Amino acid sequence: MRTTLKTTLILALLAAFGLCSALAHAGGTTAGTVYLEPKVGMYANSSKNISSMFSYGAEAGYFFVDGFALGLEGLGYSVTQKRYPTTAVNTYENVGAFSPIAWARYHFISDEKVSVFAGLGLGGFFSGVNVPRNGFTSNMTEAAEVGFNVYLVNALSMQLAGRYQHIGEFSDKGSDNWGGNLALKYGF
């Protein structure tokens, strides 16, 4: 039921993204622009102990020069992973986590209706339970993403980004995550 609700939410946001792209007016990647963006995301991963990951949160940032921004993202995570010790009744558990990440993004294509960007991020991943189950409660996380913004009005855009994020050690105690996020970006 929860997965169906999350999938429906993502599909509805993607439909709104497609329908609103015709309303585009002007972009907002100029030097001196501050932005805020609430976002949601879903991820697949390489860990045999994690079933799914869903993220929600926001980012704030500043364009220092035309097309180049630094931002700070704070995401909450809902992680479904194998319970330890496992029981016959309930093999999986939901774990809440928080991940602050500092981002550097460059918008290498930017015009009045769309901008395309690439970014690198570095931060942490913190939870009350080991994530993955054989990992740790405090982890370093590295991330990279590529995405685009479609401007709905002068200062408002829909953003879709594909992301790779590594959590924890580069061993079976860590997790490689592939997915993406959808955001509504407001610049002022």
Image (tube, rainbow, N blue to C red):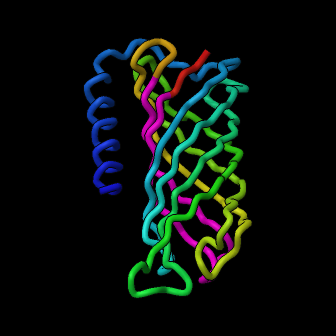
Where residue 165 sits: x, y (%)?
57, 60
Magenta span: 157-184
In the figure, residue 28 lies in which quadrant?
Answer: top right
Residue 89 rendering spot, x and y as whole percentages: 39, 82
Residue 17: give x, y in percent of width and height: 33, 30
Viewer-proximal residue, 98 or 179? 98
Q: Residue at x 50, y 65 (%)?
A: 94
Is the residue 157 above or below the residue 103 in the image?
A: above
Query: Residue at coordinates 46% horizontally, 42% vertically from top-left?
Result: 147
Residue 130 lies in quadrant: bottom right
Q: Is residue 48 left or right of residue 32?
A: left
**Above or below: residue 109 compared with residue 8:** above
**Along the viewing direction, whichever of 115 and 56 lies nearer the viewer:** 56
Relative to 76, residue 134 above or below: below
| Quarter occupied by the C terminus | top right
Count of numbered labels shown in the rendering: 0
Using residue 16 as the reference point, say whether residue 137 is left or right of it.
right
Image coordinates of residue 174 in percent, x first then y, are 62, 75
**Side (left or right) of 78 relative to 17:** right
